[in-house]
Image (cartoon, rainbow, N blue to C red):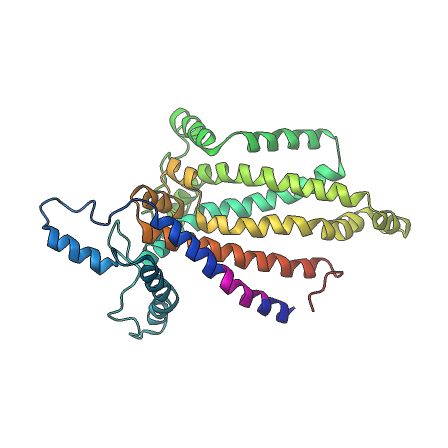
Amino acid sequence: MLSYAVRRLILSIPTLLFISFVIFMLLQLAPGDPMADVPLTVPDEVKQKMREALGVGEPALVQYWKWLVQVFWIEPQVFLDWLLGTDFSEGKQRVISWQNRAPVMDTIVQRIPQTLAVVGVAYVVAILIAIPVGIYSAYRQYSVFDQAGTFVTMIGFSIPPFFTGPLLIVIFSVQLGWLPSVYDTTHVVTDWESFKVQLMQMVMPVMVLALQITAQLSRYMRATMLDNLGQDYVRTARAKGLSEAVVVMVHVLRNSMIPVVTVIALGIPSIFGGAIITENVFGVNGIGQLLLSWLFANDLPGVMTLTFIFAVLIVLFNLIADILYGVLDPRIRYD
């Protein structure tokens, strides 16, 4: 298993380099000038020097090479400096955002806690709800519970966040006044009362996201459970006298989790990517809102770096899902 993981990690390096090159070249075709928001009173000579400082105007391959050095060499040094108190990165040029003239990685790190607090919690809640619902729906196929679950999941699939978000705001904030309509990103939890405030402002965005994720995962769980409940090994296990709980929750569930694990693992990078629509509806100052603001501002360094981080996460969690296959199914061996 270890040798397989090492081989996959080594093979992922050229894959990620190719992805980063394609993304960079595509972004080079997009219009954008880091000096677009600079006041007109600033002399052209000063603007030109600022462009040169940001690396704009150089050949595309030179800019790409500098970006690689900054991301893979300088940014790890910045992390070591923060961790160990050293000064390896002092005076070295980092990836700078055109929009706010700040290091891109610093801005991303500042936004991650807000995204994890909402999108991460929603993903965990959705998993905890979807898997039991999918299992019971499959075991009690065509029952009232199964039909109700199918109806709710169809709603989750059909109604987009830009509709459910404002709808919840109208009901719970405007009409009932129970929950805040805007997420306060400056709120700090210091005691029980502030913790309750944090929970209250998380309820609606978590509900919107969890509804969508639950709809997807519960359908996968139900479908794979139904497929395995009709297999020969299930009839054999029952014929041996095993209890129904052992048959369903041990034998059937373990095999059914293999495709579901793929969906869960591939969905985890979306947590760090944020939920663009939901974060903007509720004012969550997270990664999704950051990416949208960078796109509108034509901030190529920010968009490039954040998109590449998503690619790294997708490759990494693909590997994790493959490894979990071997854990869940003893028939799968990588050595």
Q: Is residue 264 above or below residue 209?
A: below
Q: Residue at x 69, y 40 (%)?
A: 222
Of 113 and 19, nearer the camera is: 19
Q: Could you tell me which residue is drawn at 59 percent across and 49 percent down?
A: 264
The one nearer the camera, 217 or 21, is: 21
The verdict on residue 106 being magenta is no
Classify the position of the C terminus by image quarter. Answer: bottom right
Q: Which residues are magenta?
A: 8-15
Q: Residue 60, located in which quarter of the rendered image?
A: bottom left
* 316 sits to left or right of 226: left
Residue in the image at 59% along x and 37% along y: 215
Check the image and report above or below for 20 versus 170. Answer: below
Give the image location of residue 145, x and y in percent.
Answer: 69, 32
**In front: 111, or 305?**
305
Residue 232, image x and y in percent? 86, 48
User: Which SS type dominates the magenta stretch?
Assistant: helix
Q: Position of residue 37 (x, y in %)?
A: 20, 45
Describe residue 1's horizontal placement relative to residue 156 as left or right: right
Can you give x and y, in whole percent of width and height, for residue 187 in the image?
Answer: 33, 47
From this viewpoint, is residue 186 visible? yes
- Tell me how many marks there are: 0
Locate residue 137: give its quadrant: top right
Query: Residue 112, can we see it?
Result: no
Q: In the depicted view, which residue is nearer to us: 29 or 88?
A: 29
Which image quarter is the N terminus in? bottom right
Q: Is residue 51 left or right of residue 64?
A: left
